[in-house]
Image (cartoon, rainbow, N blue to C red):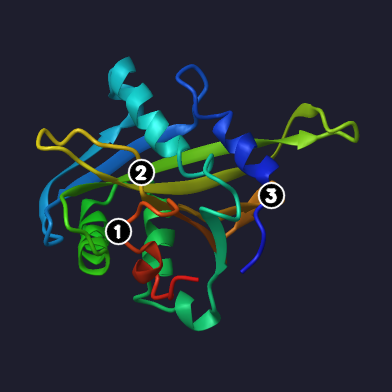
Amino acid sequence: MGNINREDMLELTRRMTLKRHCFSRIAGAYLDEEGLVDGSFNKHFQKLSAKDQQINLEIAKAIPFSDTNTELKEYSFRAEEEKPGSIWQLLMALRECELKNDAMLDVFYEIMGEKLQSKEAYAVYVFCGNYDVPLMGSDKESQWESEEVYSFLICAVCPVDEGYEPKEPTCGFLFPAFKDRSTDVHRVNLFQREGQSPYGMEAVFGWKKS
């Protein structure tokens, strides 16, 4: 397990405001207490109302903005965990298609429903973003030139009330990891709200909670 640079996460969250965000799509599903899907959605982020955009931005931002190396931790994939049929391969494919494949999303929701442990209904939100990472000058000031495009997924799991209104996220992840201001497809940042989550995001990836 490696360390996450807090500045990397803050750089991402600065691109998660209503006027300046980098999200293209949002997809999600509502699951009951038994982990069975009770409805899903898949939308272009810009087609949401300003109110709904703001609500969802707060959900997405909660993952990278959480307490670094305490609630948000870095995990590495071993070579055998990147083989065909793995959760890593599924996430890479969802990232590549930018959440436009509902069949793959259904597989992901099924995995979440099977692996997560909950005594209440919850929602799984998945966000697709593309951040044009600016070059950083020697004075650590951003330049106009782009260094690379960081394409990523944020997943947030939120308990919901009877009206399917989400509460704050209790677990989730950022994939691939944003490490040293660059893409690292062999790592993922897992979020687990300390002392509050009944779920167990590590189980989704087949890892034991540290």
Camera-side mark, 3 or 2:
2
Q: Who comes first in sequence, dot 1 or dot 2?
A: 2
Task: Please name the amino acid that badge 2 sits on.
Answer: Pro
* Residue for point 78% across, 28% down: 143
Nearer the observer, 19 or 47: 19
Task: Please name the amino acid that badge 3 sits on.
Answer: Asn
Is 76 on the left or on the right of 138, as rendered?
left
> Which residue is situated farthest in the right direction here?
138
Task: Please name the amino acid that badge 1 sits on.
Answer: Pro
Tell me where residue 81 appears, x and y as whole percent. 46, 78
* Residue for point 52% across, 43% down: 66
Provide the residue designation for mark 1. 198
Disc 3 secondary structure class: loop
- Looking at the image, is 184 positioned above or below residue 12? below
Distance of label 3 from label 1 (alpha carbons): 27 Å
Provide the residue designation for mark 3. 5
Q: Who comes first in sequence, dot 3 or dot 1?
A: 3
Distance of label 3 from label 2 (alpha carbons): 21 Å
Q: Can residue 148 be seen in this snapshot?
A: no
Where is residue 197, by image quadrant? bottom left
How many numbered circles does the render carry?
A: 3
Disc 2 secondary structure class: loop
Tell me where residue 108 appears, x and y as whole percent. 27, 60
Residue 169: image tag: 2
Could you tell me which quadrant the N terminus lies in?
bottom right
